[in-house]
Image (cartoon, grey):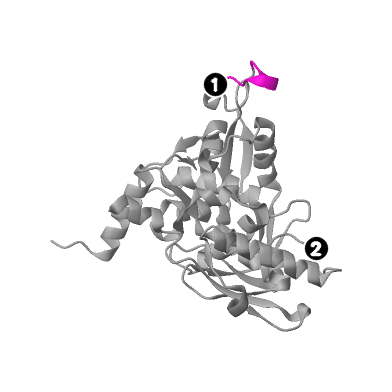
Amino acid sequence: MKKSKKERGEEKFKKAILAGARITEKSLSKIGWDIAHDKIKISLEIKWDYQIYWALQCVANLIAKEKYFGQIFNTPTEIRFAKFHEEPHRYFVVVEYKTFINFLGRKDISTEKATEIFLKLPDIILTAKDGKTKIPFCLANNNWTDINLYKDNICGVAVATKTYHTEHRSERKMKGKGVGKEEPVFILIFSNDYGKAFVENAMNRKGAQLQDHRLFRLDPKAQELFQAIRWRESQRIILNTEQISKTCGFVWPTSNIRERVSRIRKILGILKDNGFINYDQKSCEKGKEMGRKAWIFYIAKRKIERLTDQVSN
C-alpha cells in the first residue's frame, strides 16, 4: 500500500534524526521575527542573540530524539514520572557540556562560556507588546495562537552538583585550566505555557525543522537574521532597515544610516554566499533613499529540509 504524504514525512524526519541531523524548533524563529516587528519585547537585561538560539536549539534537538522526561504532581508532596498519554506538569531536559559543543560543531566554547549561556535562559522574559501577539501554542506549520497580555520566562535552569541533581553529574573531567573538575551538566525545566509548548513543538515534525549546523560558524549577526526568518520557509521575506537592525540587536535609531545599510548588505551577502538565502543586491534592494531601504529575498530552496532529502535517498 502506498504511504501517505504525512507518513513519508514522518519517516524522513525519523531517518534524519537517526542519521544525526540537527533538529530545531520553529517558535524560536517566530519570536525573533516578532521582536523585529515590535510584537514581542524581551527583558532589557538579556539580548535575544545567537547564543540563546544555540542553547535552546540544542535542547530542541535532544527533545526530538526523545531525550527528555516529564513529571506529574499527584499531591503537594508526591511527584511521579509521566506515563504514556499523561499530560506532565513539567518537562526536564538534561544537556551535557560535550553534547552542547558537539551539536554546534564547535570546540572553541569553554565550559565557563557554556555555563554563562545556559544560566541566561531563565532571565529571558517574553512580553506581548500592545496587548496582543501570536506565540506558538499549536503543533502546526505557521499556526500561532493569539495571546493577550502574556508575560513569562521560557524555562528554569540548574547545574548538576554534588548536592543538586546529583544523578546527572558528568563523569568526564576537564582538561587545561580546569583540570580535575567535572564538566558541567545543565538541567532545563519547562513548566509554564510557552515552555511546555516549546517542548511539544520539538517533539512534533510539524513544530520542528532541520537545521544546517554550518550556520553556527557564520558571523553572529548573520546567524541572528537567519534564525528570525527560517520559520517562514518558502514565503517571500520583506524587511526594512529598522526591522533588520532590531533582529540583529543593533541600536535603533542609528546615528549613521549609511553605515547601517552597508552592514546589512554585508550580512545578507554572508547568508547568500553560504547558501542560506536567495538574494541579489541589485534586484532585491528597494528604496533610493538610505533612510527608506528594504530588502526582499527568500530562504534558499529546501535549505531547512535538505538533510532530510540526503537521508532519504
Relative height, residue 55 to residue 78 (above, below) = below
Taking the image as shown, residue 225 lies to the left or right of residue 290, namely left
Q: Toward the viewer: 310 or 160? A: 310
Taking the image as shown, residue 76 lies to the left or right of residue 209, namely right
Residue beneath disc 2: 251
Region rendered in magenta: 171-180
Q: Is residue 89 visible?
A: no
* Amino acid bearing label 1: Arg
Relative height, residue 106 to residue 313 (above, below) = above
Residue 111 placement (x, y as % from top left): 65, 31
Q: Are dots 2 and 1 in contact, CB under 8 Å?
A: no
Could you say whether the residue bearing mark 1 is in a helix, strand or loop?
loop
Looking at the rendered image, the quarter that the N terminus falls into is bottom left
Could you say whether the residue bearing mark 2 is in a helix, strand or loop?
loop
Q: Toward the viewer: 22 or 299? A: 299
Residue beneath disc 1: 172
Residue at 71 percent of width and 48 percent of height: 123
Tag shown at residue 92: none
Does the magenta portion include 99?
no
Q: 10 Å neighbourhood of mark 2: few (<14), some, or many (≥20)?
A: few
Say which quarter of the image contains residue 285.
bottom right
